[in-house]
Image (tube, rainbow, N blue to C red):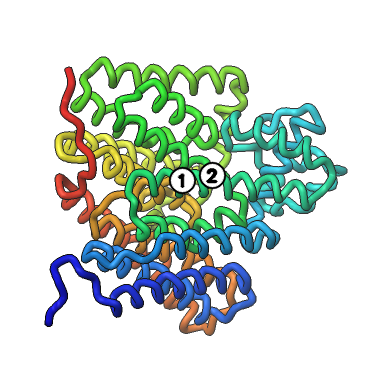
Amino acid sequence: MGRLAGEVSEPALRRATILVALAAFAVGVLLVADRSAPIGVSMMALLIPPVAWISLARDEARGARVDVRLVVALIAILMVLAVVLPPRGSRDVWSYVMYGRMVSEHSASPYSHVPSDFPHDPFLQQVGSGWRDTPSVYGPVFIAVSAVGSGIAGGSTLAARLFQQLLAAGAVSAALVLVWRHSRSPAALALLGLNPIMIGSIVNGGHNDALVGLGVLAATLLTMRRRVFAAGAVLALAVLIKATALLVLPALVLWTGFHFGRRSALRLTITTAGLVTAGYAVAGPEALRALNANRALLSRASLWQLAPRSLAPALGMSRSGWLGLLSMISLTAIGIVVLATAWWRRKDLDPLSSVALAVGSFLVLAVYVLPWYVAWMLPVACIVRRPMMRAFVATVGTFLPMVYAAKFRALPTGVGWGWRAFGSNIGPILGLGLFSLLVARTGRRAVSVIPTRVE
């Protein structure tokens, strides 16, 4: 006899369980082995999780829901391991600590001073050499949190990095709770928690991007419930951690204006802008000037790698001037895309999709983009029940770590040349194409909750 309607086959459930276990194993391999693993092993471990996420979401849509307790248990194990291990990749956590120590130990502003101004500080040598002469580009709320952490840690490197790692782990855990409460989807939890970026780059690396992603998700969910004052306050906190969180404000304001009326949209705008202005007023004008510290940087996975550098001499510009010009063009393009997309799709997008697209525009159009920036978008995007959104997140969230995984390996000449060509040229174009397709196709079918318009 055939299976009854709605009955799920045992093979489908077993496959879903195996996929979850494989994704967790792959993340664990990347976390433990890190740069010591052969490049082929690293690439394979990076490819397994997105295949698992997409398959899990497809099976879940057909009724084969993996046991959520298994997903949560595996995520918890990986997060504990990520905190126990010292940071394996980026050294940004030590910049966070040093900026906090400038306040707590040296009574100096990290916006008007740089780490190398304190040569006798025991943490200076932990800071990446390329960042010792750079002022903080982080918002005043994060600097205050880092100062508290540095004050608690004192001279202990273990306590200093654990503070930042536990802060990131707490933010990821809170995002997982919100994702589960909104979606009740084990596949969404797997996409967020069984993820090399979230476990390796964010939790193990102690990156503050987890706080940004949590703030963006919370502000979006609050907006959907028409709690615009709370949404504005939470979004302002995210902006005061990293200014790039301001990307989502136009999307939320336009959506709120259409569904809840102009007054609600105005309240959201004033609350966010007022708190951000107050925060930077307290920090002083140096905090705003310090935001330009990364203006002349070009990352290896940026679309703007394709810009003809021969134009710089022709225009009589230095390398820094040329990169500054590209940065201005990039920010203008991102602003246009965010506003145009939010306005064009304001009637048929839920705020989750609108916010995900706003952040996605940065990931494909920014001059300087790093793997952990995906965390700004991921908590919101994994709730959107649309294959195209999952495909975009999986592609970008796999491509960026792959580019940086290859950076630290000595590849054979032909392989190295081919990979650099893909990473710097083909990959960003494919990402832009997929994002354009996502914008065009994301609409009513992505909606999970659309409130009735209120004037």
Q: Residue at x 71, y 46 (%)?
A: 132
Residue 109 in sight here:
yes
- Seen from the viewer's position, the closer of residues 159 and 369 is 159
Residue 421 in sight here:
no
Against 11, is 346 above or below?
above
SS for dot 2: helix
Q: Residue at x 29, y 80 (%)?
A: 11
Q: Amino acid at mark 1?
A: Ala
Q: Is residue 240 left or right of residue 343?
A: right
Residue, far top: 263
Residue 201 pos. (x, y %):
55, 57
Residue 174 pos. (x, y %):
50, 44
Residue, far right: 120
- Quarter of the C terminus within the rendering: top left
- Seen from the viewer's position, the closer of residues 29 and 101 is 29
Q: Quadrant of residue 101?
A: top right
Residue at the disc numbered 2: 171
Q: Is residue 437 left or right of residue 223?
A: left
Against 451, is 64 above or below?
below
Q: Quadrant of residue 350?
A: top left
Q: Residue at x 39, y 54 (%)?
A: 304
Residue at the disc numbered 1: 175
Q: Are marks 1 and 2 in contact (CB under 8 Å)?
A: yes
